[in-house]
Image: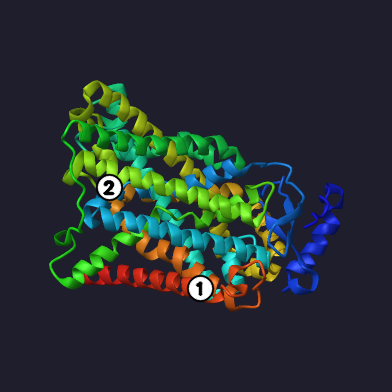
Amino acid sequence: MNKLPVIQPAGLKAARAAAAAKASTHYDREASRVVVNIAQTPWPSTNYKRRVVAFSAAGDAAAFAKPESGKSNYWDCTFALTKAIIGAGMMPIPHAFNLLGWVAACGSLLGVAGLTYWTNTVMVQGSAETGEASYAGLAGRLVGPAGSALLQAALFGFCFGVMAVYLVVIGDILAGAPGAANGLISEVAGIKSGPALVRSNCILAVAAGVCAPLVALRDISKLSVFNVLGVGAVMLLAAAAGLLGLTAVITGVAHAPPVAPNLAAFGDTPLKIAMGMAGVLPIILNCYVGHQSIHGIMGMLAPYSVQEMKAVCAGSLALGCAIFLVLGLGSVAAFGPGVSSNILNNLSASGMAPLIGSQAAAVLSVLVRGGFLVSLLGSFALLMFPLRTCLIELLWGKTLAAAGSGPAKAAKTAEIESKNYPLLTYGILASTVATAVLVPDIWAALSIVGDLASTVQAFVVPGLIGLALVGGKHLSAAFPGSAKGSGAQRAVALLVLALGVALFGNGILQRVLA
């Protein structure tokens, strides 16, 4: 295939006009074999630019105009998406191994990862087909206004809830369990009591001193170094769990991971057991949800192509799954039935001392929990981008609808965001801080987020988008379902949709019957 010439900045205006005309209506690939669309970059400030991407019939970028800032590469984007995926949601994984047994737990982690990859690729392909530059815009274009509204509510609930949970976990890492004086402040500074060990005080201090400057960044690429450090910290957490498990095996004190589910932990009737086991899946799904950041990473990837973006999704999910497996198996081998629903409670100096000695445990505790603190701060900053966009779409929905779709809507969104950036950003920050201070139990919050938000944005809406692409007018030769694969693609889309609806309904039913 012959590549088109690179579009130079001088010709950007003309190319943008031509691309907007094509992206605004369905374009017949079979007639011209080329589609041009505009993807929004995640830099909606005065330096806001739009990239022009020319796609061949195979869906690969043949030419592009690079943005003036935010250049990145595959690994930068992979680490950024991995950071968007990995966060506080991974801490219940060892507890899930004890509940489900290692066979079902490993199968669930691998199965959910595979389905999540499919949903990610559906979003990437759908954006290439339609020219939509946001998840909500894509859902509105292919699913309709009701689907877009459902997604916006789910995105807002997920991002807001998870950001609040991150702050709670940060407070717990610093202050430790109430009355235990086993947080980082106690282990590093030797403080055993006082206001410094009050979780709410720690949350307020971190929000003002660290989060406020981080969320002021308007260029997601400036978090690249932060992302690499954060992913490294999470890998250290998993490696520590694996090391502790291996040490337990070598010293002969390892706990054998349960093979079968612990049915008694779920309830005393078949219905409660079935509902309880199904309720673990959204917790696992929480670990993989990064859909809200897909379009931001698409704008960051340069040079861009559909296949390269799919590779970014695959790389981040594979890395995340490996981390989750090591964390779960290692923690269960090291701590057995004593694994907490918050694995960081087990990775304190006192928790690890029986396995590796008090001195090594003290050092490892600071490294692991301090590293995870860095990881959570990076994830908090990354989630601000999609949450801010979601809030704009909720508050200025009529204005954006009047602007049209595709590039016109993206430009209007960027204009609104630029004008209201401080108010939106720090309003969200203040709200999440207030919620975090009031939340008594992060695990109840994580369960609600998984049941009612993650299922919608990660399974229900992507399933509907997949069905629209397979059978709708936006279908192209680049999508696997366009020819003999259409039956398989439709079956997967129906499976993902049905699973999402079932888990959502199970979450509601559990709360009604509780």
Q: Is residue 471 above or below residue 300?
A: below
Across and down, in percent, residue 457 comes to 47, 64
Q: Is residue 449 above or below residue 73?
A: below
282 with respect to 133 (left or right): left
14 with respect to 439 (left or right): right
271 with respect to 165 (left or right): left
Which disc number belongs to residue 460? Answer: none
The colour scheme used to paint the residues is rainbow
Query: In which quadrant of the rendered image does the C terminus lie?
Result: bottom left
In the image, 476 versus 367, the foreground residue is 476
Across and down, in percent, residue 63 comes to 77, 53
**Residue sitting at 72 percent across and 65 percent down?**
57
- Amino acid on which disc 1 is placed: Ala
Q: Is residue 82 above or below residue 188?
A: below
Badge 2 marks a residue whose secondary structure is helix
Q: CA distance from mark 1 to mark 2?
A: 34 Å
- Amino acid on which disc 2 is placed: Pro
* Total marks in image: 2
Q: For residue 478, which quarter of the picture?
A: bottom right
Residue at mark 2: 94
Badge 1 marks a residue whose secondary structure is helix
Examine the rendering and report whether any part of residue 365 can be seen: yes
At label 2, counting other C-alpha atoms closer than 10 Å, the crowd grade (few under 14, some 14-19, many 20 or more) is many
At label 1, counting other C-alpha atoms closer than 10 Å, the crowd grade (few under 14, some 14-19, many 20 or more) is few
Query: In which quadrant of the rendered image does the N terminus lie?
Result: bottom right
Residue at mark 1: 488
Q: Is residue 466 above or below residue 224?
A: below
